[in-house]
Amino acid sequence: MPALINGWLNRGAERCQIDSSNMRDKSLDAEFESMPGGIVGAVRRTLTHWGDTVVESVGMLGDIAMFGWQVMVWLFTKRPKAGTLIPNFYSVGVLSLPVVALTGTFIGMVLAVQSHYQFKAIGMETKLGGVINMSLVRELGPVLAATMLAGRVGSAIAAVLGTMRVTEQIDALISMGANPIHYLVVPRFLACLLLIPALTIMADFMGIVGGYFYCVVIIGIDHAQYLRNSREFVGGFDFFSGVFKSLFFGGTIAIVSCYRGFHCQPGADGVGRAATEAFVLSFVLILVIDLILNILLDAVYFSLWPRGAKLF
Amino acid sequence: MNVASAHDQAIQSLGSNEKFLVETRNLSLIFGRQTILDRISISIPRGQTLAIIGESGCGKTILLKALVGLLRPTTGQILFDGIDLQSLNDVELTKLRRRFGFVFQNAALFDSMTVAENVAFPIRQHGCPKGQTPRRLILDRLAEVGLPDTVVAKKPAELSGGMRKRVGLARAIILEPDLILYDEPTTGLDPIMSDVINELIMRTRRKYPVTSVMVTHDMHSARKVADRIILLYPYTRLSKGESQILFDGTPSEIEQCQDRRVRQFINGEAGERLMEMRATQAGHGDLETPDMHEYFKKKKK
């Protein structure tokens, strides 16, 4: 195991060195030059490009998995110090609260606005509570909180770690006997993992308040019926599944962003790209994981309650 | 069992019987398809101050990083005090790193921490030596590199380049390592500050029984500080079979060296590079190279 850790650390630094000389591009260019012209050459070039992209993405996925594995190993080998944990918890949790609460409120109201006319047309306005709150608790709350976290925290993590890589601060850490995964990644991972459920609950709650406010106060749907429909339709399992999914989102954000920061290329452009790619990659992965988890959770749900909850 | 404990002792000991503190044996480093270092063998005796000189891109910083295990050699061995770095696991390597001090090119101070926290970092990792308090140690080391007490609460961003370098030096020597590595210590500093750094390196050398390796392309600094100079030449520019180490000897010997490339480096002459440049220029003026043609064609589109 330690050999793996060393090999891995080496790779991050190595890549930083390689990229500074654009080694990769050169080797590919040399291959292109040796290809014939005309249609045959064009086809071969395109195929080479595609192949290169595919190989690179598969390699990166494997790298991220290895990185995640290292984080898991270090998570249980040595406890992180409070001095490194608290600032991360503060910036991930406390500082994300306002923005998560605000977006949650608005998404609740937007849902109310969007679905109101359709439900009014069939005379089912009082059922709005069930629909809005169900979509919030199961889907929008967790995904929205995760998106905000990926944008606010994920790209910041990638930029900070990327700058540390480029300015040799990560090398300095290693040379003084600190393990960068233990020292830099584990605290960030824990902060994202442990605080994203809280942020999700906050987004859920504010969304419910927002939806209620628009439906009951502005449109004037009956307060008691709105709440009764919500309570009957949204169950404990729905709430649980949202929070459960958010744990995976948080872990993904932390690992992808730290990975991207560690493998940052030199220069302002490199750090900028690391930050952007950290967000884009974690967002895509959030949606993919969301789909998979939804399928699994649905299977569990219907095996527990074969009849399911019915809106009408 | 016996072997393991002897091994462990060697890692922690502060003076074993090995004549050479650091040794590389046929060390090669290859990134992808690019060879950076090719079969380098250097032995550094205890107490020596070695300057590795060479032009940018010849791999001297990479050699320095390989010496402390920041980069793993592709082939070959690195021995520190007789211990093969590659045979160590992570925990052992961490223990061993207490005996290294690394001064990075741009100091590599942690910018989220104050100067005092930066200097105290090795203490936090490895513990405070007996009979010392961290506070005393930090102030002593900062005074040693000529920084006033007022800097301790400052963030690295508030310091000048020379001050940052000195904080980096204070951080490297706080636990009195056996080996100090300097990565271009005078690069980017004014002549006066460069000389201050040179003096500090020499003073550190006098005060502690330390072995130093310095990577630089500042000939003045190398002549002044080093007992021994090694000139490293870029692998791609060598003719086949030649060693990357063009010169290995004392500062006075390098003045006598007759190798054209060594003379060019110590006198700071461009030599054949000028001809290469002219050839490139002529190439572009005469006729568009296929590369250029392709580039402009793409641009037009």
Image (tube, helix red, strand yellow):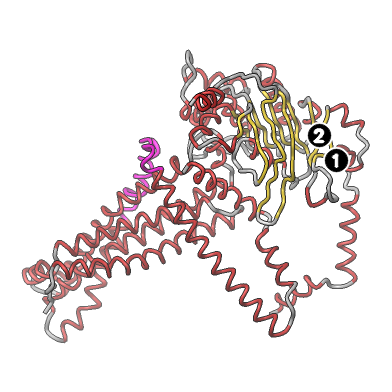
User: Is residue B11 placed above or below B237 in the rendered structure?
Assistant: above
Q: In which quarter of the image is residue B283?
A: bottom right
**Residue A239 location in percent, x, y?**
19, 61
Tag on residue A74? none
**Residue A238 location in percent, x, y?**
19, 64
Using the image as rendered, state which of residue B297 and residue B177 is in the foreground: B177
The residue indicated by pointer 1 is B265
Q: Which of marks 2 and 1 is nearer the N terminus?
A: 2
Residue A106 visible: yes
Marks 2/1 in contact by CB < 8 Å: the verdict is: yes
Considering the numbered disc 2 on the image, is that residue within a helix, a strand or a loop? helix
Which of the chains bears the disc numbered 1?
B
User: Is residue B217 placed above or below A205 in the rendered structure?
Assistant: above
Q: Residues within 10 Å of mark 1 (few under 14, many from 20)?
A: some
Looking at the image, residue B126 sits to the left or right of residue A91; the answer is right
User: Is residue A150 placed above or below B298 in the rendered structure?
Assistant: above
Using the image as rendered, state which of residue B249 and residue B268 is in the foreground: B249
Residue B199 visible: no
**Residue B220 location in percent, x, y?**
81, 31
The residue indicated by pointer 2 is B219
Using the image as rendered, state which of residue A249 and residue A227 is in the foreground: A249
Q: Is most of the magenta stretch helix, strand or loop?
A: helix
The amino acid sitting under disc 2 is Met
Taking the magenta stretch, the answer to whether it contains residue B26 is no
The amino acid sitting under disc 1 is Phe
Identify the residue shown where x is 52% and y is 38%: A173
Identify the residue shown where x is 56% and y is 28%: B171
What separation in Å lies between label 2 and label 1 (alpha carbons)?
9 Å
Part of the protein shown in magenta: A74-98
Considering the numbered disc 1 on the image, is that residue within a helix, a strand or a loop? helix
